Amino acid sequence: MIIAVDGPAASGKGTIARALARHYKLPHLDTGLLYRAVGQTVLDRGGDPASETDALAACDFDDALLDDLRLKSGTVGNAASVVSAHPAVRAALIERQQRFANQPGGAVLDGRDIGTVIAPHADAKLFVRATSAVRARRRHEELVRSGGTISYDRVLADIKARDLRDSTRSAAPLKQADDAVLLDTSFLSIESAINHAIELVEGQLVKRPA
């Protein structure tokens, strides 16, 4: 069974995807970490995330980098959004993602193009969203807890800029798959959002051909 969870930054898709993976006892992949790893590698090498050449060269990152706490920073998040717009980078990482999705028994993947590009054949698809103001508040609180000093207004501006880049890029833009079910988490608690997500997945699984 493959479950695809897509949505913009700070929508709650990662939390929901991890909960679904636990519920269905499936492996989980946060595909955004792959692009964050590329962005971090570009920065570590003194390159430019906007350069497709620099970004493509950074796709050779070591898997150990996926556990690096630096990947959670806002700077790396913005770099990830920039490098993910390069078609060559997406092509370089697509096989890794599809291999994970198609492993025996299935998997849960979250990102921005899982249901449309990586696993269009997924058994269940969710598109998780929340208002930009709510997402900015969530991200700002997360950054403050980790010791950051960035202002809420700056976080909101970054969120809006990332949304624009992700939704207008030529390569696999962020959009809801035609057969994905929408889940708006703007005014839901984490527990309520997870429970609703499970209900939506169950509803899709019931409709699967026997």
Image (tube, rainbow, N blue to C red):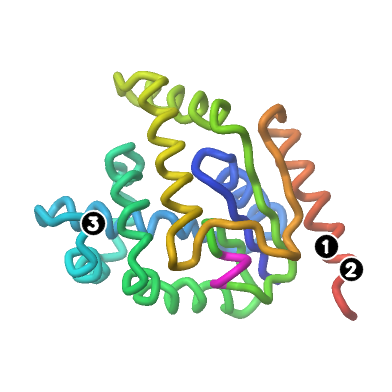
Which one is in front in this view, the residue at disc 1 or the one at disc 3? 3
Give above or below for 123 relative to 80: below
Task: Characterize the local packing of mark 1: few (<14), some (14-19) or many (20 or more) Cα atoms within 10 angstroms.
Answer: some
Q: Which residue matches tag 2?
A: 207
Residue 150 rendering spot, x and y as whole percentages:
31, 22
Residue ID at (44%, 65%): 170
Is the residue under label 2 in contact with that under label 3 (CB below 8 Å)? no
Relative height, residue 136 to residue 15 (above, below): above
Q: Assess whether mark 3 and mark 1 are in contact (beta carbons under 8 angstroms).
A: no
Please state the extent of the stretch shown in magenta in the rendering: 114-118
Drawn side of residue 172 relative to residue 55, left or right: right
Of the numbered discs in the image, which one, if any, rests on residue 50?
A: 3
Identify the element where label 2 is drawn: loop
Q: At 60% from the left edge and 68% from the top edge, which residue is drawn?
A: 116
In primary-sequence order, the first of circles 1 and 3 is 3
- Circles 1 and 2 in contact, beta carbons < 8 Å: yes
Tell me how far mark 3 sits from mark 2, CA to CA.
43 Å
Tell whether position 149 is magenta: no
Q: Amino acid at mark 1?
A: Gln
